Amino acid sequence: MKTCCLAFFVGLFILVPFLSASELNPYILQAVHAMPAGGGYASDRAAEVRLARRGVVWRPERRTLEVSPQGASPSFCSAACYMVMLRALQDWEQRQKRVVFPPELWHALRVLETHPDGALSWGRFNANGPGCAKWVHDLHAGYSFTSPEYARPGDFLKIFFSSQAGVNERGHLVIFLGIRQVDGQRYLTYWSANKRTNGFGIDKVALNDKKVCYTLFTRIINPERIADAVKLPPNDLWLAEMLTRVCRFAEMEKKCSIEKRPPS
């Protein structure tokens, strides 16, 4: 399995030079490649506390965030993707050779032990429905679209296994890796914290699987605008409501400016 994964990532990194230099995708792929394998899957209250205490920790003495995937394990899908994004942002900023994200930004990106959906950045990113897409949209840091044909490795992908978002949704937040053909079948291949991989790992789902009701891709093309997270209102009430109400996909699309394909 490790050999297969290595070969897959070698193929991905060949694609990296062809991506736009402003996109965060190459850094997301590098962060995924550096993540540990396995570690167990859990999405209970204990996993949330573990993420806050040991996975994404604000270090006041250094005024930065410390990201430890091992500390957060066993973990869940949105936590895995959030830790990858934080590491990608850290690597991207180092490449700029200047301070883009002040300490106040890293403090705003922290995870609290009790962290309601819609609150600060993690509460938005982790919310039901289009949490990641809405957060990126509000920051003008990128865009979201629905067609897999336009996806690129390193895009965030929310797979909906239910016909609606919100209170009754079943979904999975992942990092898109590509579309692969196996035995004549086309698969969405992705990385996340998955049940089938017992934690961090690569998994796939058939494009024509009837269980897949909706796919939502989000691409960060202006990483520097993440700095504006410090200016967001403390709470996104619309995302907070996803815990108690039904949200149709058409409503999501309007709220987050989601189109079938990326803007040209």
Image: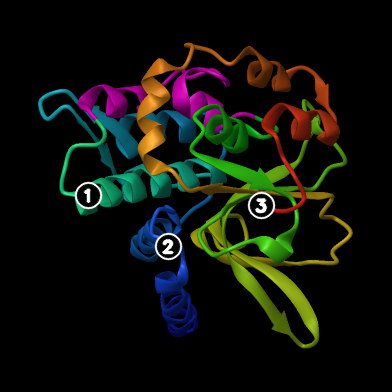
Q: Which residues are magenta?
A: 102-127
Query: Which label belongs to residue 96?
Result: 1
Q: Left or right? Give the position of 85 relative to 211.
A: left
Count of numbered circles in the view: 3
In the depicted structure, whether residue 35 falls above or below residue 82: below
Type of amino acid at the residue the image marks with label 1: Gln
Q: Where residue 8 sits in the image (x, y, percent)?
A: 49, 79
**Tag 3, which secondary structure?**
loop
At a point 43% along the width and 43% down the height, the residue shown is: 222
In the depicted structure, whether residue 71 falls above or below residue 102: below
Q: Earlier in the sequence, mark 1 or mark 3?
A: 1
241 or 112, which lies in front?
Answer: 241
Q: Which residue is mark 3?
A: 262
- Looking at this rendering, what residue extends furthest in the bottom direction? 183
Query: Which label belongs to residue 65?
Result: none
**Tag 2, which secondary structure?**
helix
At a point 57% along the width and 20% down the height, the residue shown is: 118
Q: Left or right? Give the position of 238 relative to 121.
A: right
At a point 33% along the width and 45% down the height, the residue shown is: 89
Does residue 80 show up? yes
Question: Disc 1 versus disc 3: distance between alpha carbons?
Answer: 26 Å
At a point 49% along the width and 12% down the height, the residue shown is: 233
Residue 125 is inside the magenta segment: yes
Type of amino acid at the residue the image marks with label 2: Leu
Type of amino acid at the residue the image marks with label 3: Pro
Which dot, 2 or 3, sits closer to the camera?
3
Which dot, 1 or 2, sits closer to the camera?
1
107 or 42, which lies in front?
Answer: 107
Q: Where residue 208 sits in the image (x, y, percent)?
A: 85, 66
Q: Which residue is mark 2?
A: 29
